[in-house]
Amino acid sequence: DTGVSQDPRHKITKRGQNVTFRCDPISEHNRLYWYRQTLGQGPEFLTYFQNEAQLEKSRLLSDRFSAERPKGSFSTLEIQRTEQGDSAMYLCASSEDRGDDEQYFGPGTRLTVT
Amino acid sequence: GENVEQHPSTLSVQEGDSAVIKCTYSDSASNYFPWYKQELGKRPQLIIDIRSNVGEKKDQRIAVTLNKTAKHFSLHITETQPEDSAVYFCAATFSGSARQLTFGSGTQLTVLP
């Protein structure tokens, strides 16, 4: 499968713990996005990377959230001191940097905070 | 910021009938409008998109129309089949260098056999 991959697919954690998710975009895709999706809603933008640079962050991204893309390939999203409200599907998407805007999504990581 | 409204939230049609889902957007600078299909527990899948320099685009049984003046766009599915049953999301690009998508709230389409 040469699409966007995410790991883990499911994560159950206790409130207050830290969690980290990984996203591997489609090869050669310079643009990488993180979105969050709650039940019955559309995905909401969290943050954007162009290569290794984090260029945009949503107001949804509290200071407990941090994202990296150290070598411009895979990306990680870390949530510190998780809260029950963080329970959601975390989706990663990637696109080429040629202006055509087509974003392809990974399968997501479903986080449950107990 | 950008806001995308989507209607209806649920839609049931008989197999073979057509389905239409409508969206409106607020940012007049938006110029890219994709539609995603999401089956239960799966990733959003890009099914068709349209850019602001085009009024209509068709791909087999799926078509999308765009009215930039009114700031609305629609998804049309003809000859619906049970496998078309899913949640459909419209989206629009937010003006800015990130080109992130702002999504509608989704339409649960059920095609009854």
Image (cartoon, coloured by chain):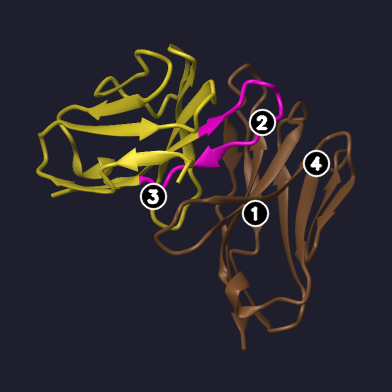
Q: Are marks 3 and 2 on the same chain?
A: yes
Mark 2 lies on a secondary structure that is loop
- How far apart are the alpha carbons under marks 1 and 2? 21 Å
Residue range (magenta): A94-108
Quarter of the rendering containing residue A52: top left
Instruction: Give the vertical position of A54 relative to A102 (above or below).
Output: above
Mark 2 — on which chain does it sit?
A
Query: Which three-letter amino acid code belongs to the residue tagged 1?
Result: Gln
Circle nearer the viewer, 2 or 4: 2
Specify which label sits upstream in the sequence, 1 or 4: 1
**Nearer to us in this view, A71 or B38:** A71
Circle nearer the viewer, 1 or 2: 2
The yellow one among the chains is A
Query: Which three-letter amino acid code belongs to the residue tagged 4?
Result: Lys
Mark 1 — on which chain does it sit?
B
Q: State yes or no: discs 1 and 4 in contact (Cβ < 8 Å).
A: no
Specify the principal SS of the magenta part. Answer: loop
Mark 4 lies on a secondary structure that is loop
* Mark 4 Cα shell of 10 Å, populated few (<14), some (14-19), many (≥20): some
Mark 4 — on which chain does it sit?
B
Q: Are marks 1 and 3 on the same chain?
A: no
The brown one among the chains is B
Q: Tell me the residue that label 2 is attached to.
A: A101
- How far apart are the alpha carbons under marks 4 and 3? 26 Å
Q: Tell me the residue that label 3 is attached to.
A: A38
Query: Which three-letter amino acid code belongs to the residue tagged 2?
Result: Asp
Task: Please tell me whether residue B7 belongs to the stretch shown in magenta.
Answer: no
Residue A33 % position (x, y): 48, 29
Label placed on residue B71:
4
Q: Are marks 1 and 4 on the same chain?
A: yes
